[in-house]
Image: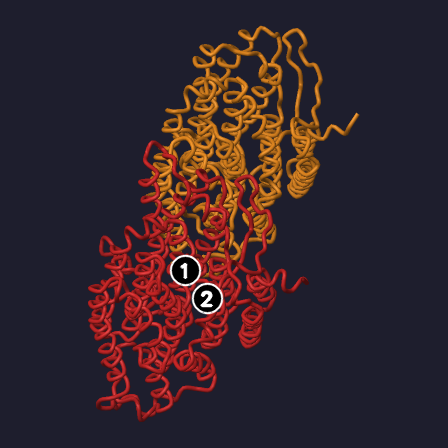
Chain colours: A orange, B red
Amino acid sequence: MQFPILSFIVFTPIVAALIIFLIPEERKSEVRVAALAAAAFALVLSIWAYFAYDVRAGGYQFVEQVSWIPALGISYKVGLDGMNAPLVLLTGVVMFTGVLISWGIDDRPREFFTFLFILATGVFGVFVSLDLFMLFFFYEIAVFPMYLLIAIWGWKETREYAAMKLTLYLFVGSVIALVGALAMYFTAGLGTFDILELEKAGFSREFQILWFPFVFIGFGVLGGIFPFHNWSPDGHVAAPTAVSMFHAGVLMKLGAFAALRVGLMLLPEGAKFHMGWIILLTLVNVVYGAFIASVQTDFKYVIGFSSVSHMGLVLMGFATLTREGFIGSGIQMFSHGVMTALFFAVVGMVYDQAHTREIPKLGGFRKVMPVVAIAFIIGGLVSMGMPGFSGFIAEFPIFMGVWKSYPLIAIIAAISIVITASYIIRVVGRVFYGKMPQEFEGHVHDVTVLDKIALVFLSFILIALGVFPGWMVPLVESGVEQILRLLGGA
Amino acid sequence: MNFFTDHILSIILFSPVFAAAILFFLPENQEKLLKWVSFVLSLIPFGFSLALWFLFDKNAAGFQFVEQFIWYAAINSSYHVGVDGIALSMVLLTTLLTPLAILASFSIKENIKSYMILFFLLELGMLGVFLALDLLIFFVFWEFGLVPMYFLINQWGSEKGEREIWGGLKVPARTYASFKFMIYTMAGSLGLLLAIQMIGVVAGTFDIPTLFERWTSLDKSLFGLDISVVKAIAFWAFTIAFAIKVPVWPFHTWLPDAHTEAPTAGSMILAGVLLKLGAFGFLRLVLPLYPTEAQRYAPALAFLAVMAIIFGAFASFGQTDFKRLVAYSSVNHMGFVVLGIAAAAYAMGGENATIALNGAVLQMFNHGLSAAGMFFLVGVIYERTHTRDLNEYGGLFPLVPVYGGILIFTSMASLGLPGLNGFISEFLVVRGSWPIFTLYTALAMIGLLFTGAYILKGIKQVLHGPLNEKWIGHLTEINSREIFVIAPLMVLMLWIGVWPAWILDVINRAVLALLS
């Protein structure tokens, strides 16, 4: 039997959470060291799994299956393919950097890291699940700690409101999706939740057309699809920094990924039928999100709405149902995850020093925190799809896919690129350049070494993917081939 | 053959990255070290380009020193580079101007390390455009070059001046100019990006030589539209992107702001090389990919070019800011490049088209020399007087005789005095365009007349007339470093003016290939 690497990845965080919880509360530095060690371990495992995946063979690899509730056909089944491998790597990266920049949390760090790691287990679990029931199981595990993390450690002004809003939105979405999933389970009549079995169930066209919107939009809520994106900027803003990173960096991908795996891959005919109008929703995401971001004055809201815009591109790529679109979306999920984690990390660092996020009140931060400024600029260039950075590698094929299916939408969506460029330039100019306001002089200091390591690490990934797409694209391509087989064969 | 000749283009292209990487690890406060290391490192690409110039077989057709590697296999894009005569002359221009611009930046005081790193990244972006033989790679470098230029203007631009934007908010002029530059060019590139995506989807490849055949021979209908409509739209998408960069009237309004606010070396590169990217885009992509459309719309392009020539000259004449005067002169001179290209596109073959296009390419090179030289000389006097207002100068010739002589020499090259380089290329363009667009070429002569007028105005206001007493004792003569910057440019101006064959031979072959 091979080494159960995926189970190790999934359960490392939750085991670590238990261990951390056993450490006495007042020994904060031990808690932090334990958290960092666990995060590093998970990162190494996810890098290993990512590079050990055999691209040439394709398909699901490292598959593990343990029967869990045989009576209902539920089993613990996990596997890695070209679509989820980058996301597992992403989660490892965000978890590691999230712990690094949360070093300074002084309010109950033990509980904080415990919840954060439970969340991480949920996220890893959703990405690798090959069983519908397990997927929902992990999904709820991921959503629930979010509520506590925001409500307890969040921004005092809006944390209760945002936590409640976020949780309700996501629960409603997941319940709708769950209904669809149950319908699939019963209609298939195979007595199993195994996704690979359900793929072959041969649902009738009418069934697929009926249930696809439930599943896709239900999960799409977590992906921030218009008009159900509303929870996300509020949630991002209220969350503490590491949670925002997780939230925008990974959690939103959870929605998009589940919409793909459960919605698109199990109900391909439904997807073909409905994508014509769903792509219009994503177009609103992309363009409207960018416009809203450009008029925000709160630094964190700018980034929050930019996530809405960028996640719209992911869903838009799915909606094209083309090879290029899927490849682009696959890469965009990774690229946006790393980029937005970087953004929220930067926002957090600026806020920790300035105690305000109002853009007009900030200025001149480049002088005191040069590394942070450069990291933000790199993230900004990724965000505006500048060639040479990962955003371009991701967005270009998405647009090619849109050209293949709906040329007019490609032209409209492209407006968002210029809008994004304008607000990124504005934020960079206002926050990092210009004159530093009097009251910050002498009060603002550079960030810690750990923060810098996190930022450099994230920036490095964005550039490496932009210059050498070869280390990710073939992998995603192999995953896309599977999706296309389902779409073509159904 | 061997590693060196097989990979010379990649070596040239990526040696600036190598230089930037070295600078990254040097200490920030060692200003002298940083400056000299940058200068020496910038000579590396220049040396290799010289080697390339001599290795280049000017009698062979097609692209030479071609390299191709897989880059983005999923969408059939590869790292594909190669040079022809046109690209070669532009590469030489870029790698020559970069060391000179770096030498001209020795007076920079703030953040030298970041400045130099950005400069090398800028060089990378420009070289990449000239060398690319893959549409996606072309676009990558095309866009990438914007970023360092934005920061050079934004951070090291002129510190004086404010501009009022919406709502009466005042922002520093350099912030305004850099933002305008970035958004203007990005908006222009947007059409280019969309058209490139569309071509990629339709043709299934981004390889430029392959597209020359596959895209032009396409004749099915696309997206429910006739192929000719689609091609016409794509043609304008390309054309507008390149026209903004050149810039062609009426897309030129970013230029005076950007040129004026940029630091001296930034203006040198901006006028010397960056504007050529647009013209080069016409030559490399628009003419071969859209021969029919280019022919159909050439009169419109020629009209815009003539407008650029005339209005550029008028606008230049009307300036009181020395740097703005030189900036508008770029609009005027680049108009001739576009006129030559439009004439060649309209005639598509024949002797006149060949002459016009040769003139256009040579004019690109020549304007690179003279505009860089002029901006440098403006910078020299600005550093000493801290003003660019022409009315503040006056009668400086006795104070700075050497500078005065150099300024007159360079201005004359820019004006098109026979015996210097500008004359050769403008004459070729006019000679080639005359039989093709007689009226437009005749109108362009008005512009040429005013070219003389504004150049002489500049010289008169700075050097002649009553001496402005306040500069006595304050104005120092041009120093040896500065002479070293301008000298190579002057030598080339004279050399091309007297004996242009050495460069025209290289250009001509590529021009013939383009028109066949």
Towards the viewer: B361 or B257: B361
Mark 1 = which residue? Answer: B280
Chain letter for the residue marked with disc 1 in the picture: B
| SS category of the residue bearing label 1 | helix
- Where B145 falls versus B201 (above or below)? below
Image quadrant occupied by the N terminus of chain A: top right
Mark 2 = which residue? Answer: B90
* Residue B94 in picture, x, y percent from top left: 47, 68
Q: Kindly identify the residue that appears in the image at 39 percent across and 28 percent down.
A: A279
Towards the viewer: A222 or A260: A260
| SS category of the residue bearing label 2 | helix
Asked if the residue under mark 1 is in contact with the one under mark 2, i.e. CB atoms within 8 Å, the reply is: yes
Horizontal side, residue B119 vs residue B176: left or right: right
* Residue A368 in picture, x, y percent from top left: 49, 59
Horizontal side, residue B365 vs residue B35: left or right: left
Q: How far is mark 2 from mark 1, CA to CA?
A: 9 Å
Please name the amino acid that badge 2 sits on.
Met
- Toward the right, the furthest residue is A1
Please name the amino acid that badge 1 sits on.
Phe
